[in-house]
Image (tube, grey):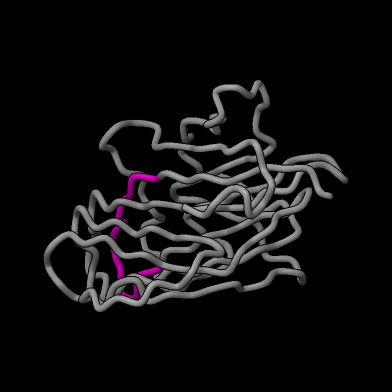
Amino acid sequence: MADPRLYGGDDYFVVTNPTLDTGLATIAAPTTGADIEPFVILKNNDIKGGKLIYPDYIRLTCTAAGTAGASLRISAKIDDAARYTSGSTATVGPKNANMNSPLTSIALFYAGPLVAAAASSAQRMIGEALARMAIPVVGDEFVIKFGQAIAVNSIAKNGTAPTTYVINFAPVILGDGDSLLVHLWLPSQSAASSYLVESGWWEKMAS
C-alpha cells in the first residue's frame, strides 16, 4: 500500500467481505462495462467543504468463475454525482484502522450486483486494464492500486492456476458527493462470477 504520509492523513478506513469465504456476485452478464453496471462504488458522503477520500486499494478474490467469460477487464471511473441506486451486498465497515482515533468514516461503500444511475456529464474514465485473457480461475486475486508506481511483470494472463494480478490506476481524490466506480466486465459471460471484496482508503480534511 502507498505511504499514508504522501497524503498527510491520520485516518485510514477498511471495508471487508460480509461473510468469510463467500463471494459477492456480479450482475448476471456484465459483458460491456456499461456505466450503470459497476461492481464497486465508493462515495464521499461528507458535507461540502468536508474531508477528501484518497482510495488506496481494492482487492478482489475470485470464488466463482461464472460461465462462458472470454476475458476479464477492469475499469475505473469517477463522477461528481451520487450514482448508487440498488443491488449492494453490505460489506463490513468502514472500520478505522487507527485504534487511537475515535473518528468514523464519511464514505459509503457498495459492492455486488449493483445498479447505478446514469453517468453525469462530468464522469471521467481514469483507467482500464485487461486483467485476464481467459475466464478467471477460483483463487485468482486482482489487486487494484491507486496512485502507486507501475510494476512491470510477466505473469501469464491466460493460465489455469490461481494467480495474483496487480492493476495500477491513477491516483484519485474524491471530494464531497464524488463517486469512484469500478467495473468488472467479461465479454461473452452468461452467468455471474463472484469475488471476496476488501478495500482501504485515507480520509483527511482539504487543506
Question: Closer to the camera, 198 or 102?
Answer: 102
**Residue 143 pos. (x, y %):** 38, 58
**Residue 200 pos. (x, y %):** 51, 44
Residue 189 magenta-drawn? yes
The segment highlighted magenta reads 185-197
Question: Closer to the camera, 46 or 151?
Answer: 151
Residue at image location 49% in from the left, 37% down from the top: 15
Residue 48 magenta-drawn? no
Question: Dividing the picture into quarters, in which one does residue 51 lie?
Answer: top right
Question: Closer to the camera, 41 or 203?
Answer: 203
Q: Which residue sits furthest right? A: 49
Q: Which residue sits furthest left? A: 160
Question: Dividing the picture into quarters, in which one does residue 204 lie?
Answer: top right
Look at the picture and state if 27 lies above or below 201: below
**Residue 88 pos. (x, y %):** 50, 42
Question: Closer to the camera, 200 or 195?
Answer: 200
Q: Main secondary structure of the magenta part?
A: loop
Residue at image location 33% in from the left, 49% down from the top: 195
Is residue 131 toward the left or the right of residue 171 in the image?
left
Is residue 127 toward the left or the right of residue 49 in the image?
left
Is residue 111 toward the left or the right of residue 195 in the image?
right
Residue at image location 47% in from the left, 55% down from the top: 39
Residue at image location 74% in from the left, 66% down from the top: 120
**Residue 34 pos. (x, y %):** 53, 70
